[in-house]
Image (spheres, helix red, strand yellow):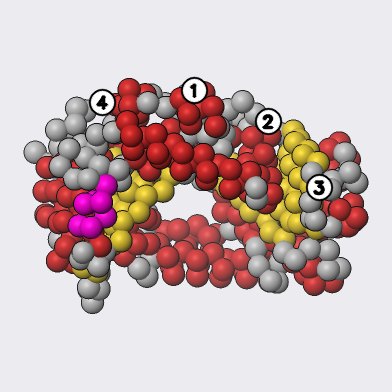
Amino acid sequence: MNQHFSTHAASPSLRTTRLPNGVTVVTEPMPGVATASLGVWVGAGSRNERADEAGLSHLIEHMAFKGTRTRSAQKIAEEIENVGGEINAATSTEGTSYTARVLGEDAGLALDVIGDILTDSVFDAGELAREKGVILQEYAAVEDTPDDVVYDAFTEAAFPDQPVGRPILGRPETIRSFDEAGIRAYLDREYTPDRIVVAGAGAVAHEAIVAAAERHFGALPAKTAPASVPGVYGGGERRMPRKLEQANVVIGLPGLSFRDERYYALHMFAQVLGGGLTSRLWQEVRETRGLAYEIQAFHWPFSDCGLFGIGAGTAGADLPELVDVTLAATARAARDLDATEIARAKAQLKVSLLSALETPGGRIERNARQILAWGRVIPAGEVIDKVDAVTVADVRAAAAAMLQGTPTLAAIGPIRKLPALDRIAGALRAA
């Protein structure tokens, strides 16, 4: 018997069903919308890979479109595009998604294609060899892009020798080693029903989505995947001197899990510090001093850890001043950010949250991710209440605690004048 959950806690149209083996189906019809967004989210990403599997989640995402026992790669594309639809996939640190957007009348076709590629792919040796070549080209493109390289180096330095810190693309040596047996072993181990959410929004019917989910995923054996390796922030540095026109630098500190009660406070600190044109770093670094074309502060939360950072690019000669100004502004913000800045940050967060829910694609993304993280869809009003409850004192306290952590530094380009890591730590802890 399928288990149905109450919908009163979320929007009236949202319905959730859990199949007997643990697969969850969530739908949210949207009146007046003619298209349907559908997808399957799997709570397994790059941090679920073993050392010799680095990049395998991303390869599987690519190989999903390369043919099943009943559909060639071309047929997969044709069936979706013949009805005007789009199909895509994405890999992140903690999850992988396979999505499609079609007219409501073609929702069944889209789910049939997605279900087919996830349960009946053949992983043809020729296609596998070609796709590994494509990913190696993607890897090379990243290596030729300094502002991509520096962020990969940044996460690796922050979480040294840990899956959560590895690049999602993997490494050339691991990418070349993948074969069909390794792919199937990973899928069997990590793509378990309790980690699978089938989501639909827009012009969708719940019963039809449940039937499709049962047809494609209902026979999967109920079992639990192994837990991912815990993420433990370490900190450190990675300096990559290169003959480039510009130096790219990222300075970071330990962030917070999205499960931490201080998460929203630290997220607001990132917004105040470097989240927009009115942010402190933008005004001081870009507008007042002209030291960088752009500068940003960010907070990346994971299920058990997080990473805070500030990233910018500048001329090598301006690097010491950029770093000094950035550190001073960060320490000062932790001491004296005010109610006006927090009110602005709250408004920006609310707009970001609510605008994402105005499209079917945004709805399925929110619904699937929250079920994987929390076991339920959290109403927007509940999130807004948490945002509104944050005080100036909460944000200052979260920032001050973070600044006592060990910093992470990554830089590439003409970085000879980049200050030492212990000097950066001292400037931040002085707050």
Horizontal side of 79 relative to 1 (left or right) equals: right
> Mark 3 and 1 residues: CB-CB less than 8 Å, in contact?
no
Per the rendered image, the range of residues in magenta is 73-79
> Mark 2 and 4 residues: CB-CB less than 8 Å, in contact?
no
Q: Identify residue for label 2.
A: 234
The type of residue carrying mark 1 is: Asp
Magenta span: helix, strand or loop, mainly?
Answer: helix
Q: CA distance from mark 4 to mark 1?
A: 24 Å
Tell me residue 135's x, y (percent): 48, 41
* Among the two numbered marks 4 and 3 on one chain, the one whose residue lies closer to the N terminus: 4
Q: Secondary structure at mark 4?
A: loop
The N terminus: image quadrant: top left
* Residue 127 quadrant: top left
- In this figure, what is the number of numbered marks? 4
Say which of 272 and 339 sits in front.
272
Q: Identify residue for label 3.
A: 243
The type of residue carrying mark 2 is: Gly
The type of residue carrying mark 3 is: Lys
Q: As displayed, is residue 65 above or below residue 179?
A: below
* Among the two numbered marks 2 and 4 on one chain, the one whose residue lies closer to the N terminus: 4
* Among the two numbered marks 2 and 3 on one chain, the one whose residue lies closer to the N terminus: 2
Q: CA distance from mark 2 to mark 4?
A: 33 Å
Tell me residue 147's x, y (percent): 67, 51
